[in-house]
Amino acid sequence: MQTIQQIAINEDTYLKQLELADAEQLFLLTDSNRENLMEWLPWLNYTKKVEDSRQFIQATIHQYNDNRGIHYGIWYQGRLAGTVGVHTVDWINKKTSIGYWLGAQFQGKGLMTEAVATYLDVLIFGSWDLEKVTIQAATENHKSRSIPERLGFQLEGILRRNEFLYDHYVDHATYSLLKEEWLDWKTDKKS
């Protein structure tokens, strides 16, 4: 797999592979958005100090070194705004699933849609040459669901009680995108 440390999205935004030096910024972004993130993400109870963010980044570095995927920070105007990454890559079946989040102060700018589109284009269907990617989001998480819907993903179905969020279960909408659908979507957008 080709090493790509930084990927430009536009003049103000780029993806940069998470590295240990980003741990403090990642933790501060997480901590300042804790209440918002807890609505949809199950890992906030495990991220209580900078060392927890450092351990997460170390795990993503191991994942990358083991050729199982890569996690990027989304940088907007020189500030860490959120993350996007794969859970793991299934090389036998040429597929993966991705997850993402943004700090509340960076939402509503189209950053995540652009970040996911860039990630899909450059890595998943580009250098990795995968056939399928999936995204799951809680059925009531309309902001997160809007990303795959904007990018041409197909709703495959609803997984009932798929994730436990602190004190309750949530259902997940599961979206998928095939390589040829991505190429068709990009062609349609250019027309």
Image (tube, rainbow, N blue to C red):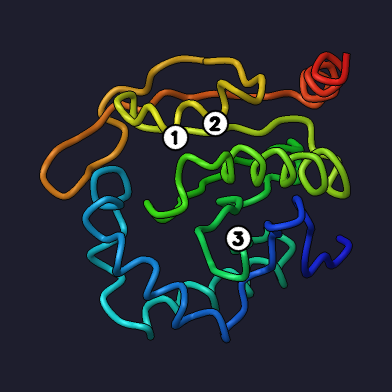
Q: Establish if 157 lies above or below 130.
A: above
What quarter of the picture does the C terminus occupy? Answer: top right
Tell me where residue 165 appears, x and y as whole percent. Answer: 21, 45
Q: Secondary structure beneath disc 3?
A: strand
- Of the numbered discs in the image, which one, if any, rests on residue 147? 2
Q: Nearer the viewer, residue 94 or 21?
A: 21
Identify the mark at residue 144; answer none if there is no mark. 1
Indicate the position of residue 121 as horizontal and vertical percent values.
80, 40
116 vs 138, left or right, is: right
Please name whichever residue, 7 or 12, is drawn nearer the observer in this view of the structure.
Answer: 12
| Residue under the point 39% across and 18% down | 158
Q: Label 2 vs label 1: CA separation?
A: 6 Å
Q: Do callouts 2 and 1 mark residues in contact (Cβ within 8 Å)?
A: yes
Task: Give the amino acid at mark 1.
Answer: Ser
Q: Residue at x 51, y 48 (%)?
A: 100
Circle 2: residue type: Ile
Residue closest to the eye, 138 or 89: 138
Q: How far is mark 1 from mark 3, CA to CA?
A: 19 Å
Question: In the structure shown, which secondary structural element does the residue marked by tag 1 occupy?
Answer: helix
Residue 86's spot in the image, x, y percent? 60, 50
Residue 21 placement: quadrant: bottom right
What residue is at 42 percent from the left and 76 percent from the top?
53
* Vertical placement of residue 113 versus 10, above or below: above
Q: Are marks 1 and 3 in contact (CB under 8 Å)?
A: no
Q: Residues within 10 Å of mark 1 (few under 14, many from 20)?
A: many
| Mark linked to residue 76 | 3
> Where in the figure is residue 112, as x and y percent of width and height?
57, 43
**Pointers 3 and 2 in contact (CB under 8 A)?**
no
Q: Amino acid at mark 3?
A: Tyr
Please name the residue shown 76% across and 56% down the image: 11
